[in-house]
Image (tube, rainbow, N blue to C red):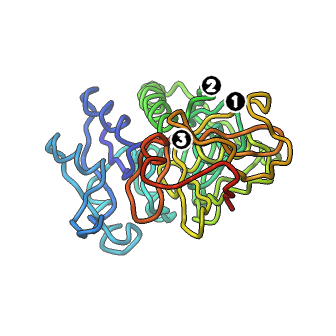
């Protein structure tokens, strides 16, 4: 079957790699336009475009995938399947109607849980123990189409959004190949989603990553893991923004908490910066103060004065 692949973010890379290695007929790869990135505004390409270019595949980068010109281009590809994964644009019904067989989507959650743009992040932020991947038929309403296949994966305490995305990307690639095989053999069913079990995973905002030290320490820990790599969990110290990239939870028995307030520094050493968070403490292991680079806590305290009794807010 002839396939047109839609993808941009790294989550989509394993799926495209699997299609290439599986000798599937990829007519074209559709990805987001090149964008200026970084301090020097160098033109950056998507991870999917990099892989497509290496494989010598045709690449299409429309500003608006639903424009008249884009629709005409896609129709002329005469595809059997559209396969989308973390593409970054919503496909209109006119586009979804183009493939001869099915428009498929690889979604990084166990639908109908976590419909939306950031399912991996919200699964960790909300402290879930499991996540997974769904292969579904795309419909006009976001992430609401019937399910072809699903597979579950455990979320470990050490997972963050970056590591979980890597594992889910690999899981999705394998599940995609199984789904395509089932479609070829006409050995599949479209299972409607249970509308009563819908939850949402909206796109992250910078305000979502502000640490509230009054919350339980486990919620703070989950937030730090869940908002990587962007926007990154943050607090403030002496009027400066402080991003926290890596931390661990420690029992209150390790430090004397008498008289301490939430957000108060209890200890600062090369092992980390201990901060009071309710009945327990958070040990900050990697952080970055505004205007400086990310660094381990031991290196940070050498160049920045931080002492027991200081307050994060």
The residue positioned 63% from the left and 66% from the top of the image is 207
Split into 4 quadrants, where in the image is the C terminus? bottom right
The residue positioned 32% from the left and 57% from the top of the image is 31
Q: Which of marks 1 and 2 is nearer the N terminus?
A: 1
Residue 129: which numbered mark, if any? 1
The residue positioned 76% from the left and 45% from the top of the image is 277
Q: Residue lying furthest bottom in this view?
A: 68
Residue 45, position in %: x, y? 25, 57
Residue 156, position in %: x, y? 61, 26
Spatial separation of the CA atoms under disc 1 and disc 2: 6 Å
**Marks 1 & 2, CB-CB < 8 Å contact:** yes
Choose mark 2 or mark 3, whichever is in front. Answer: 3
The residue positioned 58% from the left and 60% from the top of the image is 203
**Marks 1 & 3, CB-CB < 8 Å contact:** no
Q: Is residue 175 visible?
A: yes
Residue 78, position in %: x, y? 29, 52
The tally of labels here is: 3
Q: Write down the residue under mark 2.
A: 154
Q: Write down the residue under mark 3.
A: 246
């Amino acid at each position: 079957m002839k396939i047109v692949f839609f993808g941009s973010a790294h989550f989509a890379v394993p799926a495209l790699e699997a299609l290439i290695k599986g000798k599937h007929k990829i007519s074209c790869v559709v990805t987001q336009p090149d964008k200026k990135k970084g301090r020097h505004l160098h033109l950056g390409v998507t991870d999917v475009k990099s892989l497509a270019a290496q494989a010598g595949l045709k690449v299409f980068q429309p500003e608006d995938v639903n424009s008249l010109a884009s629709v005409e281009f896609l129709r002329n590809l005469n595809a059997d399947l559209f396969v989308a994964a973390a593409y970054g644009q919503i496909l209109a019904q006119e586009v979804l109607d183009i493939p001869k067989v099915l428009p498929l989507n690889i979604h990084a959650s166990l639908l109908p849980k976590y419909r939306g743009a950031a399912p991996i992040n919200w699964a960790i932020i909300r402290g879930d123990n499991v996540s997974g991947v769904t292969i579904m038929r795309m419909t006009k309403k976001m992430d609401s189409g019937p399910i072809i296949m699903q597979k579950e994966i455990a979320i470990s305490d050490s997972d963050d959004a970056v590591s979980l995305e890597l594992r889910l990307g690999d899981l999705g690639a394998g599940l995609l190949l199984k789904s395509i095989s089932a479609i070829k053999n006409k050995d599949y069913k479209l299972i409607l989603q249970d509308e009563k079990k819908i939850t949402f995973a909206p796109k992250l905002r910078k305000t979502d990553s502000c640490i509230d030290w009054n919350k339980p320490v486990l919620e703070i820990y989950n937030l730090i893991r869940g908002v990587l790599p962007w926007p990154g969990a943050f607090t403030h110290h002496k009027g400066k923004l402080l991003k926290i990239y890596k931390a661990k939870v420690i029992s209150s028995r390790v430090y004397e908490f008498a008289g301490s307030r939430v957000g108060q520094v209890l200890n600062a050493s090369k092992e980390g910066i201990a901060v009071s968070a309710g009945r327990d403490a958070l040990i900050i292991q990697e952080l970055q103060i505004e205007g400086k680079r990310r660094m381990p806590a031991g290196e940070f305290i050498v160049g920045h004065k931080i002492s027991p009794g200081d307050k994060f807010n």
